[in-house]
Image: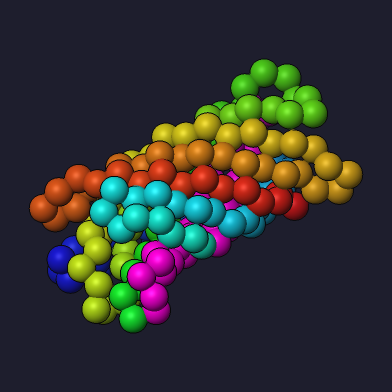
Amino acid sequence: MPRLRPRFSVLILLTAAFFLDVGTATAQTAPRPKIGVGFNAVLSSTEGLGVGVRGRAAWPVNADLSLAVGTGMTGFVLEGRDEATYLLDPQVSVIVTMGPQGPRTPYFLGGVGAAIPVNNKTNAESGPTLHFGIGWVQGLRDTILFYEVDPTMLVGETEISFVIPFRIGVIF
């Protein structure tokens, strides 16, 4: 398990560098990225219920398609601090907005990422992830509210597990 972590880190860093390069190459013609922050509640098939925070930057390609890079930190703390598991989950996503922009607009998102336990005393699985979800954006006055469900499959060393995050937050 420890020998796989550097590979995931390199994969995430290379992907992030690609998206940053795409963003700087088209910076003169593309609008600035949308930044979203929020809270999530996570149901895991191996760890139970967790709570955490998440951030994401999305670069619009056109009116319907965005490319996004984000990460979150989730704590599975229901058994107390001593038995808690903390999970870092970077993701690279494609976001497709459905239908015309209205007061409440649905979107689909999907992509790849990684699950990385950050505390040493845990036996939580780490590995690559694949996610596909649905969300909605709700226009406010100066910001946008988002809420989404993003089921994720974690390919661990010995098993496949599933995680279902429920997220709510704001986009600036």
Tell me where residue 41 appears, x and y as whole percent. Answer: 50, 53
Residue 44 in view of the camera: yes
What is the span of residues highlighted in magenta in the rendered image? 53-81
Q: Quadrant of the N terminus?
A: bottom left
Seen in the image, is 145 located left or right of residue 154? Answer: right
Tell me where residue 45 appears, x and y as whole percent. Answer: 29, 48
Is 60 within the magenta?
yes
> Magenta segment, principal secondary structure?
strand
Seen in the image, is 69 located left or right of residue 113? Answer: right
User: Which quadrant of the figure has residue 11?
Assistant: bottom left
Residue located at (86% from left, 48% from top): 142
- 112 and 154: which one is in front? 154
Tell me where residue 132 appears, x and y as whole percent. Answer: 42, 35
Residue located at (56% from left, 48% from top): 167
Residue located at (20% from left, 45% from top): 160
Seen in the image, is 146 located left or right of residue 78? Answer: right
Residue sticking out furthest to the front? 79
Residue sticking out furthest to the right? 141
Residue located at (73% from left, 19% from top): 100
